[in-house]
C-alpha cells in the first residue's frame, strides 16, 4: 500500500505548506502541543494581523473612484482605479439592514465565483468598506469587475457605430461560447439582453449581471416565471411556465441577435400583453403543434390576468429577416421558436452555418475602436439635453420624444426613489426593481406587472397598457448619418410608445 | 454543486495546514489548554447541530455553518469574540448560501432557547446582520463549501455498498466535523477516510467473529448491520482509538471479506490519492472519539468562563503542567 501511495504522488490536492512529519492531531492529548515553541515564543501578540497572511477581500480605500457608470435601485456602479488598472465597482445595496447582505447578492457572488470563462465577466475581487460607528456610516460591499468600454445596448445606440456582419458574428460567437459554458455549469442567466453584454474595444464580449441567475433545478422543481426583462422574455414565461430551462436564455440570445441585425430591439412590447402579442405577430399564433401545451399553462394567475391570444397570426419571422441574409434569417428562425424544446441550444446555435461561412467572424482586436458607450452615459446625455431643450419636448410631443423620455423614466436616477427613501412605499413597486440597464447595473427583480404609471409625458402612454400596438415588419436599420441625439429614434421605427425601460418597470 | 472542486475557492483558498491552525489557536491557548479549547469548540459545533436539527435543516447546511465557524476561528480567537454570536451568524449565512433561507428571528429565537440557562443570547437582528458583514469579510466572500457526503455517496454507489455501511460512514462524516479535517483536506479524502474506518471496523468485527466461532450475536455475517446504533459504533471506534498503535496502514486481512466481497486493501491501493492523507484523517477522527470519552456538555460553560475571564495568561510552563494534569484540573 505504501508503494502505491508513493507512485501516486501527482495527486492534485494542494499540499500543506509545512506538512507535519508526525501526526500530531490536535485531539490526541498524548502528544501536545503540536509544536512546543509556538505558544512559547510570543507572549502577548496581536495575532489577528499575523494570521491574515492569505489574501482577503480588499478594502474600498485601495480604490480611487473615477466616475459613475450606472445606477439603479439594486446597485450603483462606479468606474474606479487601482494601481493604474481600470475597474468597475458594483455596490451591493442592503434592502433591509436587519437581514444582512441580500441573498440575491450572495447568489450572484456565489455564481460568479464559480464561473471562469473568457466570455463571462470575471468577479475580480470584493471590496469592503467597514463603515464606522462614530460617523454612523454604513458598511458597504462592492463587487469588483474589470472595466469594459461598452455594453451592447449602448453600442447599438451610438449613432457613430454601425456593426458589420463579421462584427455581429464575432459577438454572436462569443455570446454563444459564454452561454455554452454557463449552461454546462448548470447556470441559467435569466436576464439575457443587450445591456447585459459588455464589450471591450478589442471586440471581446462578456456576459454580465448574474443577479437573476440561478443554478439549474432538479427536474420537477419550480422557478419563478417573473424573470427576464420584458423585451427579451420568452413566450412561455408570459404564460406562467415555471419549469423552464436553458431555453429561456436562448430566446434572449435570439432577441439580442435580431437587435444586432436590426439596430434596435426586435420586440418592444409596451406591456406584458402587448409583448406577447408582438411575439405572436412575429412567430405566429401558438398552436398545439408549434407550442405544445401552451393553452394549459397557468398564465399570469397571480394577478388573475389571462392573456388574450390572437389566433390568426402567421409566422413571418423568416421573411422579415431575409434582408439580412438567408443564413441570418435561418438562425433567427431557429432561435425565436415558440416551443422551448425546439429552440436551438447554445451549442447547436454555435454550430449554425451562419457563423461558419464567409464573411467569417472578425478577429478579436481587428475591430474599429469606439468612444465608450454605456446605457447610463446615454441617459445622462439625454438628461442634460432634456434640460437644455425642456421647452421643445413637451408632454404633448409623442412619438419622437417618447423613446428618449422613457429612457429617463426608466433608467434615470432622478426618477427613482433614493435608496434610503425607497425601501418602503415611496417608489411603489418600482423601488424593488433596478432602474438602469447596463451590464454592471443591476437587474430587475421581477418583471413589471403594472403599467407604468409615471411615464414622463403621459398623454398617450397612460392608455397603452391595455391597447395593443401592431407589430410592424422590421425595416433595415435607419442609421442617422450625423451625431443626432442618440436615442431619438426614427419615428418609423415602431409604434411602440414605450422604451426599453418600460420593460423593466412595473 | 456541479462545479469543479479543484478550481473552487475551497480548494485554492481554504485548505489550510496545521501550522496555520496552530497559530490560530495560540492566543486562546494562553488561557486554557488544548483539550479544553477543543471541548469548548466541540460544544459550539454541537450547538450549531442542535439548532440545525430543531429548524430541520439538511445535514449539508449544518456542515456549512460549522465550516464557516471553523474558518472564522482560523483568524480570530474565541477569547476575543463571542462564539454564540459567531455561531448564530454562521447558521444564518449558511442558510442563505445553501438556499434554505430562514428568517433571522427564527435563528435568534432558537439561540435564545438553546442558551437560556447559559447566559442567554443577548443579540437582536441588527447585531446578527451587522456581524454577518464581518463574517463575510473573514471568509473573504468565499462561500461555497464542498462536503464529503456527495463523494461518499458516489463511492458507495461504485462499490455497491450496503445501505447500513453507507449509513455508518455517513455518521463518521458527521462526526468528522468536530475535528479540523475539513480545514485541512479535500472532501473526497475525508469521505475515503470514513470508508477506511468502516473497512477497519468491518474487518475487526470479522476477525472477532471468527475468533469466537460462535458469533451468534451477529447473524449478518460480519457486516455492520443497521441495528448497530451510532453509540455502538462509537464504542467500537473508542476501542480502536485506544488500541491505535500506528498499525492503521494495514487493514487487517480483509481479502475476500471486504465490503461487498471486494478486496478493499487493493481497492484503496489502486486509488489515485495519497494513502498517508487518508491515514492522517483517520487518526484525527479516531482521536476525536478518544476525547469524546471524557467530554461532558455540563463542564463546558465553566471552561468557557475560564477562557474568557482568565486575566493572567498561563505561562508556558504552567500550561504544560496543566496539560499533564488536565483531566483533574478541567472543571475549574
Image: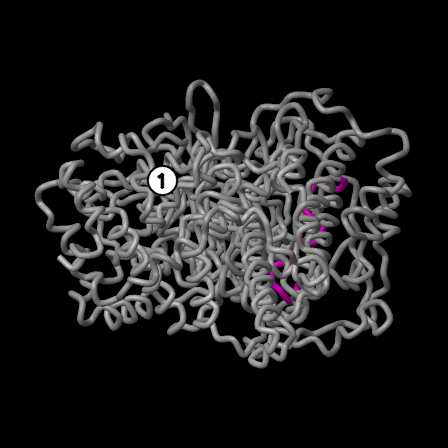
Residue B13: x, y in percent?
A: 47, 37
Local SS, label 1 = helix
Residue B55 pos. (x, y %): 39, 72
- Left or right: B76 with respect to A471? left
The residue under the point 55% across, 52% down is: B193
Residue at (26, 66) in percent of width and height: B297
In reply to whether residue A39 is colored magenta, the answer given is: no
> Number of marks in the image?
1
Query: Magenta span has A262?
Result: yes
Name the residue beneath numbered marker 1: B21
Quadrant of the image containing the N terminus of chain A = top right
At a point 34% along the width and 64% down the height, the residue shown is B46
Q: Is residue B38 left or right of residue B151?
A: left
Residue A225: percent from left, percent from top: 61, 66
Say which quarter of the image contains residue A130: top left
Q: Is residue A139 visible?
A: yes
The answer to which of A217 and B198 lies nearer the viewer is B198
Left/right placement of residue B331 relative to residue B42 reads left
Q: Is residue A102 left or right of residue A179?
A: left
Q: At x 33% / y 48%, what residue is drawn?
A: B135
- Within the image, what quadrant is residue A157 found in? top right
What range is drawn magenta here?
A: A261-274
Color scheme of the displayed model:
one colour
Main secondary-structure element of the magenta-colored stretch: loop
> Residue A413, how many percent across, how many down?
41, 45
**B255 or A330: nearer the viewer:** B255
Mark 1 neighbour class, 10 Å CA radius: few under 14, some 14 to 19, many 20 or more: many
- Asked if residue B103 is positioned above or below residue A29 in the image, the reply reads below
Q: Which chain letter goes with mark 1?
A: B
Q: Nearer the viewer, residue B107 or A383?
A: B107
Amino acid at each position: 500500500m505504501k508503494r502505491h501511495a508513493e507512485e501516486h504522488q501527482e495527486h492534485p490536492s494542494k499540499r500543506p505548506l509545512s506538512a507535519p512529519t508526525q501526526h500530531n492531531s490536535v485531539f490526541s492529548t498524548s502528544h501536545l502541543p503540536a509544536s512546543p515553541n509556538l505558544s512559547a515564543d510570543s507572549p502577548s501578540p496581536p495575532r489577528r494581523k499575523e494570521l491574515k497572511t492569505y489574501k482577503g477581500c480588499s478594502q474600498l480605500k485601495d480604490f480611487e473612484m473615477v466616475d459613475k457608470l450606472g445606477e439603479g435601485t439594486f446597485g450603483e456602479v462606479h468606474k474606479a482605479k487601482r494601481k493604474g488598472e481600470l475597474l468597475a465597482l458594483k455596490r451591493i445595496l442592503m434592502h433591509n439592514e436587519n437581514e444582512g447582505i441580500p441573498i440575491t447578492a450572495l447568489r450572484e457572488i456565489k455564481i460568479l465565483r464559480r464561473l471562469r470563462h473568457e466570455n463571462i465577466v470575471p468577479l475580480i475581487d470584493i471590496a469592503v468598506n467597514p463603515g464606522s460607528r462614530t460617523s454612523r456610516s454604513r458598511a458597504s460591499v462592492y463587487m469588483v469587475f474589470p472595466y469594459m468600454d461598452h455594453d451592447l445596448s449602448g453600442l447599438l445606440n451610438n449613432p457613430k457605430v454601425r456593426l458589420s456582419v463579421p462584427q455581429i458574428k464575432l459577438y454572436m460567437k462569443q455570446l454563444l461560447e459564454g452561454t455554452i459554458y454557463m449552461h454546462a455549469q448548470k447556470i441559467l442567466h435569466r436576464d439575457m439582453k443587450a445591456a447585459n453584454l459588455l464589450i471591450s474595444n478589442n471586440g471581446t464580449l462578456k456576459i454580465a449581471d448574474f443577479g437573476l441567475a440561478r443554478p439549474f433545478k432538479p427536474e420537477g422543481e419550480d422557478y419563478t416565471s417573473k424573470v427576464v426583462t420584458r423585451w427579451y422574455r420568452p413566450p412561455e414565461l408570459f404564460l406562467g411556465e415555471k419549469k423552464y430551462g436553458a431555453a429561456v436564455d436562448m430566446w434572449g440570445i435570439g432577441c439580442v441577435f435580431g437587435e444586432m441585425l436590426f439596430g434596435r430591439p426586435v420586440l418592444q412590447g409596451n406591456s406584458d400583453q402587448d409583448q406577447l402579442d408582438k411575439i405572436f405577430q412575429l412567430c405566429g399564433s401558438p398552436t398545439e403543434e408549434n407550442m405544445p401545451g401552451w393553452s394549459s399553462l397557468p398564465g399570469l394567475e397571480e394577478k388573475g390576468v389571462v392573456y388574450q391570444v390572437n389566433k390568426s397570426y402567421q409566422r413571418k419571422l423568416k421573411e422579415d429577416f431575409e434582408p439580412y441574409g438567408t443564413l441570418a434569417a435561418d438562425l433567427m428562425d431557429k432561435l425565436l421558436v415558440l416551443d422551448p424544446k425546439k429552440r436551438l441550444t447554445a451549442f447547436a446555435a454555435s454550430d449554425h452555418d451562419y457563423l461558419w461561412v464567409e464573411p467569417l467572424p472578425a478577429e478579436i482586436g481587428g475591430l474599429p475602436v469606439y468612444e465608450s458607450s454605456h446605457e447610463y452615459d446615454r441617459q445622462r446625455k439625454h438628461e442634460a439635453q432634456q434640460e437644455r431643450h425642456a421647452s421643445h419636448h413637451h408632454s404633448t410631443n409623442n412619438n419622437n420624444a417618447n423613446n428618449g423620455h422613457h429612457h429617463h423614466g426608466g433608467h434615470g436616477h432622478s426618477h427613482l426613489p433614493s435608496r434610503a427613501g425607497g425601501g418602503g412605499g415611496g417608489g411603489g413597486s418600482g423601488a424593488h426593481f433596478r432602474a438602469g440597464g447596463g451590464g454592471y447595473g443591476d437587474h430587475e427583480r421581477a418583471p413589471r406587472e403594472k403599467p407604468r404609471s409615471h411615464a414622463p409625458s403621459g398623454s398617450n402612454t397612460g392608455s397603452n397598457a391595455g391597447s395593443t400596438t401592431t407589430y410592424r415588419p422590421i425595416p433595415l436599420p435607419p442609421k442617422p448619418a450625423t451625431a443626432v441625439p442618440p436615442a431619438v429614434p426614427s419615428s418609423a421605427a415602431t409604434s411602440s410608445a414605450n422604451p426599453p425601460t418600460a420593460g423593466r418597470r412595473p | 454543486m456541479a462545479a469543479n472542486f479543484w478550481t473552487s475557492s475551497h480548494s485554492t483558498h481554504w485548505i489550510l495546514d496545521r501550522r496555520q491552525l496552530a497559530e490560530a489557536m495560540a492566543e486562546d491557548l494562553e488561557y486554557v489548554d488544548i483539550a479544553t479549547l477543543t471541548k469548548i469548540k466541540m460544544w459550539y459545533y454541537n450547538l450549531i447541530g442542535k439548532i440545525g436539527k430543531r429548524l430541520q435543516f439538511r445535514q449539508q447546511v449544518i456542515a456549512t455553518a460549522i465550516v464557516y465557524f471553523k474558518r472564522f476561528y482560523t483568524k480570530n480567537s474565541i477569547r476575543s469574540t463571542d462564539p454564540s454570536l459567531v455561531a448564530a451568524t454562521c447558521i444564518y449565512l449558511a442558510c442563505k448560501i445553501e438556499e434554505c433561507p430562514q428568517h433571522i428571528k427564527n435563528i435568534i429565537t432558537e439561540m435564545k432557547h438553546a442558551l437560556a440557562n447559559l447566559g442567554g443570547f443577548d443579540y437582536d437582528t441588527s447585531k446578527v446582520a451587522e456581524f454577518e458583514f464581518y463574517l463575510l469579510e473573514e471568509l473573504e466572500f468565499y462561500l461555497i463549501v464542498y462536503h464529503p457526503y456527495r463523494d461518499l455517496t458516489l463511492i458507495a454507489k461504485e462499490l455497491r455498498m450496503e445501505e447500513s455501511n453507507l449509513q455508518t460512514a455517513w455518521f463518521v462524516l458527521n462526526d468528522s466535523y468536530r475535528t479540523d479535517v475539513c480545514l485541512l483536506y479535500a472532501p473526497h479524502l475525508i469521505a475515503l477516510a470514513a470508508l477506511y474506518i468502516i473497512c477497519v471496523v468491518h474487518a475487526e468485527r470479522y476477525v472477532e467473529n471468527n475468533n469466537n466461532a460462535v458469533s451468534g450475536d451477529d447473524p449478518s455475517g460480519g457486516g455492520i448491520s443497521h441495528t448497530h446504533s451510532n453509540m455502538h459504533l462509537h464504542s467500537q471506534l473508542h476501542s480502536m482509538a485506544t488500541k491505535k498503535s500506528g498499525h492503521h496502514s494495514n487493514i487487517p486481512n480483509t481479502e475476500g471479506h471486504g465490503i461487498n466481497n471486494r478486496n478493499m486493501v487493493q481497492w484503496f491501493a489502486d486509488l489515485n490519492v495519497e494513502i498517508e492523507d487518508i491515514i492522517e484523517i483517520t487518526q484525527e477522527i479516531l482521536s476525536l472519539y478518544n476525547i469524546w470519552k471524557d467530554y461532558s456538555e455540563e463542564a463546558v460553560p465553566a471552561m468557557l468562563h475560564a477562557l474568557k475571564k482568565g486575566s493572567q495568561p498561563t505561562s508556558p510552563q504552567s500550561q504544560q503542567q496543566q496539560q499533564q494534569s488536565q483531566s483533574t484540573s478541567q472543571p475549574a
